[in-house]
Image (cartoon, rainbow, N blue to C red):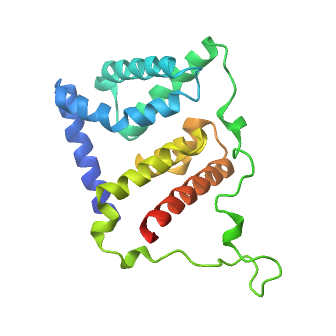
Amino acid sequence: MTQASIQERTSHEETELLDRLRAGDERAFEALVARYYPTMLAVAQHHVRTRAIAEEVVQEAWLGVLKGLDSFEGRASLKTWILRILVNIAKTRGVRESRSVPYSSLGPEGEEPAVEPQRFRGPEDPFPGHWRAYPGDWHRLPDEALTQGETLRVVIAAIEQLPSAQRTVIALRDIQGCESEEVCALLDLSEGNQRVLLHRARSKVRAALERHLDG
């Protein structure tokens, strides 16, 4: 399937979803909430003091979505539109709660390596900087090994253990499918910071998968 056909199918599915939402289809709305709630909560928590306040922000955002459905013009994707509503409310609430530290000030969360330095050859080695032992080729594994519930639980657990900024970036990029430009705009990040956070998050999740699949 070509990229154009994928985009066309996505657009068609979103149009159908919008029609159902505007018609008051409760199941469609419940499915939408289930899809985006975890990511919305994670993003909100970076703008307010507590989880309780973040949950209030998410609830307020959903009310904004319901009120704005009829005026949604489709200039951005539905997902992007929802997240923008959330961020605007979260920022306003964050200022109200006297917490106005910009997300970008978190930077790349220190300089910890994404992968343990011991896994690479040292400067005295004929091939400095290369892997001591390369990760296993997961493409050779049966599909069942990559899709079974245990493997998915490993991925979810690894993401949940990430530092908050990394967790939010990988959730937006790899779970919600946001483009890097969207993430930078939503989280007030520079492209460089976004790229570093995503790289570190993916590396840690990959390391967890490697330990699980390679035994």
- Which residue is depicted at the point 18% across and 25% down? 26
Q: Does any portion of residue 75 appear in the rendered image?
A: no
**Which of the pair 138/4 is nearer the observer?**
138
Residue 35 vs 114, above or below: the answer is above
Q: Residue furthest front?
A: 215
- Taking the image as shown, residue 111 lies to the left or right of residue 64, namely right
Query: Quarter holding the C terminus?
Result: bottom left
- Taking the image as shown, residue 210 lies to the left or right of residue 188, namely left
**Which of the pair 95/160 is nearer the observer?**
160
Residue 86 location (% of width, % of height): 46, 26
Q: Residue furthest top?
A: 96
- Taking the image as shown, residue 19 lies to the left or right of residue 202, namely left
- Which residue is depicted at the point 62% across and 54% down? 195
**Which of the pair 7/213 is nearer the observer?**
213
Q: Residue furthest bottom?
A: 126
- Which residue is depicted at the point 53% across and 74% down? 135
Residue 13 location (% of width, % of height): 23, 46
Q: Residue furthest right?
A: 124
Residue 144 vs 191, above or below: the answer is below
Residue 73 location (% of width, % of height): 34, 33
Residue 55 location (% of width, % of height): 44, 21
- Which residue is depicted at the point 66% across and 71% down? 119
